């Protein structure tokens, strides 16, 4: 996020790992205000208006907040997200979008006193005041140093919890794990190798984690201190978004500069006008292929995929169903 070298490596990783999907990657070097790479430079952040997915990742959480808070880049990101773009956040960016951001480097590296900084409050816009703690189960410190809870350790984490307002939900995300939020469906999914921990304020729900399950984690004490309870969900599990809180959709460009929202709408319309549309013949082949897949007739499904490709379209099988992308002439 704040380093050209780091984000360059991330871009290379995405391009390699998703090569079958032929992603079109653009690095947006909106790194620092008052420089040629300012997040307020309209030319630099223009690609955000045309993105289908926006990724923000490693770096310093507090640096990210300072550079993005009320910036053109952040407003453009919010606008594009409301119009359908997916947001993919990792590490520092996850911390930064919290209502209160954990100053990881300041505490862990510099040795400052425990404190919180105001974050970008992404989910607060939807009625969900959340604090995200990635690297929840980190063990870089081995047996000598507790680096769980995003390098804070359980003891310091408990003291940090005492400093937070009572109405916040804390979301801990294990390493090599993602929490996927589907606002339209009102559900969440845990993917990867680990789990997700929710620390709530208020009365226990039916599926709250039992104290005996949490023994030794320090979470029983934290929940009692915050007069709340804990949910733990493991990889592969789905749960209702209401378990995190009451999600309230935002109408249009509410809270965004009018100029940003108008530009986002214009960019969306331009993309729709320029996008090629598959012929009805192709759509019929897609429907036939989907039926073959449901019947587990994989040979027929592969044959239909090739017929679709011969007509200039690539089929992408997604959780939401088959999607079509035009095949570039150079790839045919």
Image (cartoon, rainbow, N blue to C red):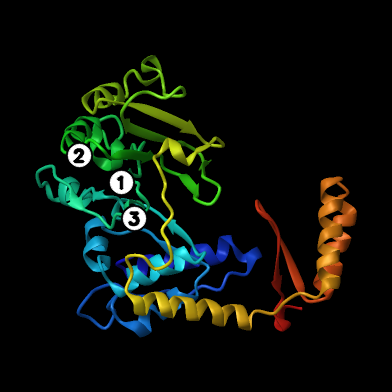
Q: Is residue 64 left or right of residue 51?
A: left
Whether tag 3 and tag 1 are in contact, CB under 8 A, the answer is no
Q: Is residue 326 visible?
A: yes
Marks 3, 2: nearer the viewer? 3
Instruction: Estimate how packed mark 2 is, as few (under 14), some (14 to 19) or many (20 or more) residues with alpha carbons within 10 Å.
Output: few
- What residue is at 29 percent from the left and 29 percent from the top? 143
Quarter containing the N terminus: bottom left
- Where disc 3 sits, the SS reads helix
Relative vertical location of residue 159 with respect to residue 328 in this rendering, above or below: above
Residue farthest top in this picture? 212
Of the image marks 3 and 2, the number of the one nearer the N terminus: 3
Whether tag 2 and tag 1 are in contact, CB under 8 A, the answer is yes
Relative vertical location of residue 154 with respect to residue 244 in this rendering, above or below: above
Relative vertical location of residue 214 with respect to residue 324 in this rendering, above or below: above
- Where disc 1 sits, the SS reads loop
Relative vertical location of residue 270 with respect to residue 235 in this rendering, above or below: below
Residue identifier under label 1: 129
Residue farthest left in this picture? 113
- What residue is at 89 percent from the left and 54 percent from the top? 299
Whether tag 3 and tag 2 are in contact, CB under 8 A, the answer is no
Give how far apart the Cα atoms at labels 3 and 2 are: 17 Å
- What residue is at 85 percent from the left and 52 percent from the top? 291
Q: Is residue 19 left or right of residue 81?
A: right
Give how far apart the Cα atoms at labels 2 and 1 are: 10 Å
User: Which numbered disc covers residue 275?
Assistant: none
- What residue is at 50 percent from the left and 71 percent from the top? 51
Residue identifier under label 3: 125
User: Which numbered disc covers residue 165?
Assistant: 2
Percent from the top left, x then y, of residue 32? Answer: 24, 73
The foreground one among 274 and 236 is 274
Instruction: Estimate how packed mark 3 is, as few (under 14), some (14 to 19) or many (20 or more) residues with alpha carbons within 10 Å.
Output: some
Hey, which quadrant is residue 269 in on the image? bottom right
């Amino acid at each position: 996020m704040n380093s050209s070298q780091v984000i360059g490596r991330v871009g290379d990783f995405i391009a390699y790992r998703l090569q079958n999907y032929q992603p079109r990657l653009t690095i947006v070097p909106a790194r620092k205000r008052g420089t040629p790479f300012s997040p307020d430079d309209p030319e630099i952040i223009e690609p955000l208006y045309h993105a289908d997915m926006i990724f923000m990742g490693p770096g310093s959480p507090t640096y990210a907040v300072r550079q993005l808070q009320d910036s053109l880049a952040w407003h453009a990101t919010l606008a594009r997200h409301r119009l359908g773009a997916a947001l993919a956040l990792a590490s520092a960016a996850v911390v930064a979008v919290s209502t209160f951001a954990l100053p990881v480097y300041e505490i862990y590296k510099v040795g400052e006193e425990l404190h919180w900084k105001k974050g970008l409050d992404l989910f607060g816009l939807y009625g969900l005041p959340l604090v995200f703690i990635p690297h929840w189960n980190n063990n870089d410190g081995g047996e000598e140093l507790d680096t769980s809870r995003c390098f804070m350790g359980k003891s310091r984490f408990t003291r940090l919890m005492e400093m937070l307002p009572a109405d916040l939900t804390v979301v801990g995300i294990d390493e090599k794990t993602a929490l996927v939020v589907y606002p339209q469906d009102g559900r969440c999914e845990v993917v990867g190798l680990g789990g997700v921990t929710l620390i709530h304020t208020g009365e226990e729900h039916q599926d709250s984690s039992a104290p005996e399950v949490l023994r030794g984690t320090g979470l029983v004490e934290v929940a009692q201190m915050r007069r709340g309870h804990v949910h733990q969900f493991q990889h592969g599990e789905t749960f209702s978004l209401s378990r995190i809180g009451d999600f309230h959709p935002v109408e249009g460009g509410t809270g965004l500069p009018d100029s940003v929202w108008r530009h986002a709408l214009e960019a969306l319309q331009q993309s729709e006008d320029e996008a090629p549309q598959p012929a009805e013949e192709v759509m019929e082949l897609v429907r036939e292929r989907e039926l073959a897949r449901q019947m587990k007739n994989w040979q027929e499904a592969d044959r239909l995929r090739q017929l679709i490709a011969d007509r200039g379209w690539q089929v992408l099988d997604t959780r939401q169903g088959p999607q079509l992308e035009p095949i570039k002439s150079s790839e045919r």
